[in-house]
Amino acid sequence: MTPALRFVVPPLAGLVLALGATPAPPSAPLDAAAILQRSEAKWNGLSTYQVPVTINGSVRVAFVSVPVRMTGTQYYRAPDQQALHLNNPPSYARGLGDTLSTMGTPQTWLRDYAIAMPASQPHGRHTAYVMTGTPKKSGSRVKSMTMSVSATTYVIESITFAYNNGASLVVTFLHHTGISEYRLARSATVVARFPGYSGNATITYGSYQLNQPIPASVFQTH
């Protein structure tokens, strides 16, 4: 007896779906403003912070390298004010403290720099957006600034300033996770190369005080 032939016919709905399906269009790449706005959004609800800092490293002035240990307090007030006050820094280390005080924030970077389209690059176990900006105003001491922003958490992982006189400043951050809803720095490494001095330092951040009043005088230039 000849076995009966069996035909398997695909369901009509599935066939139509297979023929008519089109791949979803790729999402548009994020520009610099969108990335930095996402970084800012991580601090929504944070009006101020102040945190004690300890800076350990060395400063080289002329031909002499001197170890340095400084303490102080870093302040932030939304949306774009920050200050670093050091406790009686030695004269040879004041330049490093002043430089760290004037780095700016994502808000000031968007205002002060024309930032090119980001490039995605591997960074450890994740991907980072790398963006380079040039000053919008003429006469700036800064030639360019380059930042690396995590494509996962949108925290600023590092920032590099190149200056017109050949100087450079590189700051690389590590962040807290889990101590609050904000990803705040727990440490930073600094490499500074300026005509009058050079230095390498590690900044350790202590316990943050969040959303407490800070006098306006703290942010005034002295």
Image (cartoon, helix red, strand yellow):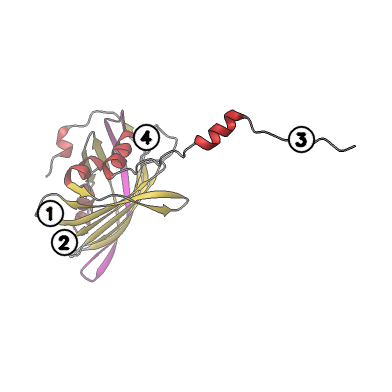
Q: Are marks 3 and 1 in contact (CB under 8 Å)?
A: no
Callout in the foreground (2, 3): 3
Q: Is residue 47 magenta?
A: yes
Q: Which residue is mark 2?
A: 164
In this view of the protein, which residue sits in the foreground, 74 or 34?
34
Between discs 2 and 1, the one toward the N terminus? 1
Count of numbered labels shown in the rendering:
4
Q: Position of residue 12 (x, y in %)?
A: 60, 29
Q: Secondary structure at mark 4?
A: loop
Along the horizontal axis of the image, is 111 left or right of 119?
A: left
Q: Secondary structure at mark 2?
A: loop
Between discs 2 and 3, the one toward the N terminus? 3
Label 2 – label 1 distance at C-alpha: 8 Å
Name the kind of residue labelled 4 in the image.
Answer: Tyr
Along the horizontal axis of the image, is 160 left or right of 10?
A: left
Name the kind of residue labelled 1 in the image.
Answer: Ser
* Location of residue 47 by image quarter: top left
Q: Which residue is mark 3?
A: 6
